[in-house]
Amino acid sequence: ETGVTQSPTHLIKTRGQQVTLRCSSQSGHNTVSWYQQALGQGPQFIFQYYREEENGRGNFPPRFSGLQFPNYSSELNVNALELDDSALYLCASSLARLSSGANVLTFGAGSRLTVL
Amino acid sequence: SQQGEEDPQALSIQEGENATMNCSYKTSINNLQWYRQNSGRGLVHLILIRSNEREKHSGRLRVTLDTSKKSSSLLITASRAADTASYFCATDARGGGADGLTFGKGTHLIIQP
């Protein structure tokens, strides 16, 4: 059973550029979510994908977008990068839950984005 | 925005001692989880406690939940150097759906050998 893998591990972009981060879910998981973690802070929920559609979103602007593919892998795209977008971006996979079930996440190691 | 607030922000203890960290949150929850993060890497799930539970154990971990005070504590007994990490509480809001987890700012735990 493979865990969650993310690429790239590190990248540097300049303000105004666009970035795509990639994630492969853990085997058997069908839901993927993305989190942004600024230095010294806890992760903040960006959005979640299930059955290739976004089904939940945190307080992030539309320039943060994503995709989920039939094999449950996912991409996070950020357009018009700003300095404050510098952070560790974490992908997490899970099993879709019933309304009363628990949302236990398996995280990847993250992609560290630096915006200059 | 962060729902949970961990306390203390940083904790340094000797190996073998017990470590206690606390978490407070603001809204009604379905369950509360604790995660560990080593040096800016991915988070690892440690333990989950449901809103109708008061205490839960897993190995050297003990978690309590007081929904009336909207608070939880994580106790790590007989600490080891490998326990050095940041610990986060995460709440799962009532109503389910796809709201994601809401994390606190974390407690940075250092175990001195």
Image (tube, coloured by chain):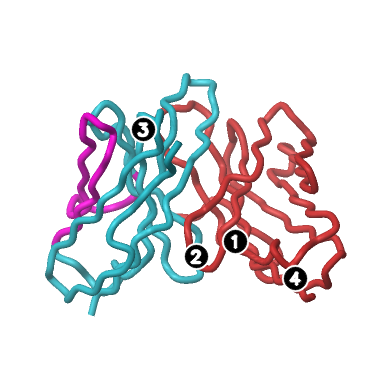
Chain colours: A cyan, B red
Callouts 1 and 4 in the same chain: yes
Question: Which labelled disc corresponds to residue A39?
Answer: none
Q: Secondary structure at mark 3?
A: strand
Pointer 4 residue? B111
Q: Between label 1 and label 3, give the one nearer the viewer.
A: 3
Pointer 1 residue? B106
Pointer 3 residue? A31
Furthest-front residue in view? A1
Residue B37 drawn at (x, y percent): 56, 59
Real-space CA distance between mark 2 and mark 1, rounded to the nearest whole angstrom: 7 Å
Q: Chain of mark 4?
A: B
Residue A72: name its quadrant: top left
Badge 1 amino acid: Gly
Callouts 2 and 1 in the same chain: no
Q: Residue at x 73, y 67 (%)?
A: B81
Q: Between label 4 and label 2, give the one nearer the viewer.
A: 4
Q: Secondary structure at mark 1?
A: loop
Callouts 4 and 3 in the same chain: no
Real-space CA distance between mark 1 and mark 4, rounded to the nearest whole angstrom: 16 Å
Q: Secondary structure at mark 4?
A: strand
Pointer 2 residue? A41
Q: Is residue A61 left or right of residue B93?
A: left
Residue A48 drawn at (x, y percent): 33, 38
Q: Chain of mark 1?
A: B
Q: Is residue B58 left or right of residue A78?
A: right
Q: Which residues are magenta?
A: A58-79
